[in-house]
Image (spheres, rainbow, N blue to C red):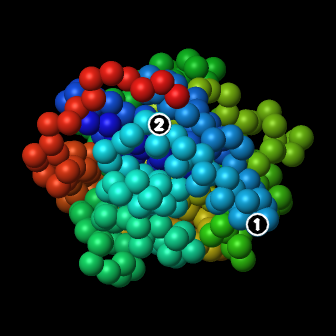
Amino acid sequence: MRILFDVGHPGDFHALKNLGHALRAKGAEVLFTTRDKEFERELIKAEGFPFKSFGTHYKTIPGKIWGLLKFDVQMLWTAFRFKPDLFISHGSIYASHASFVLRKKHMSLEDTGNMEQIRLYKPFADVVLTPEVLPFDLGPKQIRYNGYHEIAYLHPNVFKPNPSIFKMLGLAENEPFGILRFVSWNASHDGGHSGFTAEDKAGLVKRLQQNMRVFISSEAELPEHLKSFEFKIAPEKLHDALYYASIVISEGATVASEAGVLGTPAIYTNTIPISYCQDQEKYGLVYNTTDSKKVFKLIEEILQLDRAEFRKRRKKLLEDKIDVNQFFLDFIKDRYLKDSKIFSEKPVSL
């Protein structure tokens, strides 16, 4: 069987990579497709998957409109040559359209509820798998599960943190450090929303430096006075860093949620409400606020707590949720592979 995975964000790839490995182990041939947005290509290469990039991700509205047409054509051509039996993605418009034209099934994941994208892919998808906490009713195609995407790749069954990250970051063993994550604010769902000001960012660095080393992960280019704090590790090592960090402060929901699932206290500061981050706040793992000034008060609260307390909170969260990667695999086996004997014999060159 041939399966085409389309990913448009590092988090999409992480959510699907272990599923890809499991399906390959079962005999399926897989292909990942992507656009050059952040470091998707590097992550796919690090995991050893065959892939095809469709080129630069467009940031402007006119560019996104052009990209919709361009990437639709590229996806259709790639799928026509690869001949997938199943498409899998996180809300990929391009995978959904190609699956419809080729009369194949498309299994989509969704966890944020970006309706401007959902309207373009849901009519052509077979199912849409969502966390139970997603507050949107997407109709009869929606199937809910008790977890978040981040659990699919950060559950102890599939992720083991590597303490060598301290050396990679130039730190002494167990030396405290914090991670700041800034987004670029050019995604289609970012319009009208905001996070930290330039003054806030400088203030955060200054405050955290009183207790720890500071590292910044940023989608947009950092100003000159913050460039010395920029993360300089391979992107596939980010989760090791998140696990051992003392605190994570993020404008992006994915990084905040990843930290929470790993038992690292995180502050999510963004005017876009995200249900899974809000759910993690119930466990005392992700603090949600739209007020960047409140972040400084939350920092004081978090740093007064013992680090082990957050590991206990993580244990409780994982006890309450399912192993999401196993759920994805079982779902695919039951829905798409139960009677399938059409495993590919030869790779298809692209």
Relative to 326, 252 lies left or right = right
Question: To which quarter of the image does residue 108 belong?
Answer: bottom left
Q: Nearer the viewer, residue 306 or 203?
A: 203
Residue neighbourhood size for the residue with mark 1, other residues' Cα within 10 Å, grouped as few (<14), some (14–19), many (≥20): few
- Secondary structure type for disc 2: helix
- Is disc 1 in contact with disc 2, using a CB cutoff of under 8 Å? no
Q: Quadrant of residue 285?
A: bottom left
Which residue corresponds to mark 1? 61
Label annotation for residue 147: none
- Amino acid of disc 2: Arg
Identify the residue under disc 2: 81
Q: Residue at x 60, y 46 (%)?
A: 74
Above or below residue 168? Residue 307 is: below
Give the CA distance from mark 1 to mark 2: 30 Å
Q: On the rendered structure, is 99 left or right of 339?
A: right
Quadrant for the N terminus in the image: top left
Which residue is nearer to you in this view: 53 or 305? 53
- Looking at the image, is 44 positioned above or below residue 183? above
Instruction: Inspect the image, locate mark 1, and give the three-letter code of the amino acid beneath it.
Output: Ile
110 to 25, vertically: above or below: below
Mark closest to the chain's N terminus, 1 or 2? 1
Examine the rendering and report whether any part of residue 271 can be seen: yes
At x 58%, y 29%, the residue is 42
State the residue in front, 141 or 221.
141
Image spot of residue 221 (x, y percent): 80, 44
